[in-house]
Image (spheres, rainbow, N blue to C red):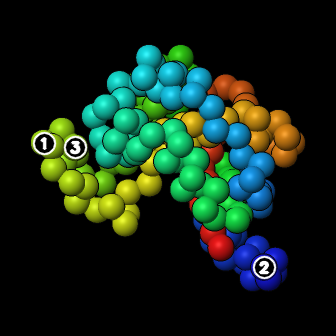
Amino acid sequence: MNTEKFEEFISQYPIFEYRILDTKDITIQERVRTICQEECERYDSTWACPPAVGTLQECEKKIKSYPQAVFFSSVAEVSDIMNMEEILSTESCDICEKCAYKEGKPCRYPDRMHPCLESHGVVVNEIVERESMEYNLGGNTILWFSMVLFR
């Protein structure tokens, strides 16, 4: 990869921190999916969330089919850090006003829909710790973590 060109490209976006990862080092765990199911109101309500994104094994196979990933964070301000509804508000696709999943129809924009990392069982905090990235900025500031897979 041409690091200079990549730096120029990524600097156009509001990225707080990023790391290039080998996908073989990304841990997938069922416990992450359990948190989705028990704590997120979007579970089983959109094509971008479990169970619609596929089994954990299918998600892991998809991730590992790419050799590398850009793992990055962006900063957001929330009115109340304890308001889980506000914190989870962008954790899944919101392209359509009403997801076709609820209507039993296929996703209208499968090429634009981007599931959250947790839907695929990715252990985000493990990556953050291993890569010495910031996890908490304090106050009512939160960090969103995302990943783009590439060849």
Q: Quadrant of the N terminus?
A: bottom right
Nearest the viewer among 71 and 54 is: 54
Amino acid beneath label 3: Tyr
Earlier along the polypeptide chain: callout 2 or callout 3? 2
Q: Specify the quadrant of the image occupied by residue 48.
A: top left
Name the side, left or right, on which 134 lies relative to 38: right
Q: Position of residue 54 (x, y in %)?
A: 41, 44
Q: CA distance from mark 1 to mark 3?
A: 5 Å
Give the amino acid type for the residue marked by disc 1 in the picture.
Glu
Packing grade of label 2 (10 A; few <14, some 14-19, many >=20) is few
Q: Is residue 123 above or below residue 93?
A: above
Quadrant of residue 2 in the image? bottom right
How far across and down, in percent of the image, does residue 53 sit? 40, 45
Q: Amino acid at mark 2?
A: Met
**Which residue position holds label 2?**
1
- Residue at 28 percent across and 34 percent down: it is 45
Label 1 with label 3: CB-CB less than 8 Å: yes
Q: Horizontally, is 60 left or right of 135 in the view?
A: left
Residue 78 visible in the picture: yes
Instruction: List the residue tagged with mark 3.
Output: 101
In the rendered image, which residue does mark 1 sit on?
A: 103
The image quadrant where one finds the C terminus is bottom right
Residue positioned 47% across, 26% down in the render: 36
Front one among 134 and 31: 31
Disc 2/disc 1 C-alpha distance (Å): 42 Å
Label 2 SS: loop
Secondary structure under the numbered disc 3 in the rendered image:
helix
Distance (Cα) linking label 2 and label 3 = 38 Å
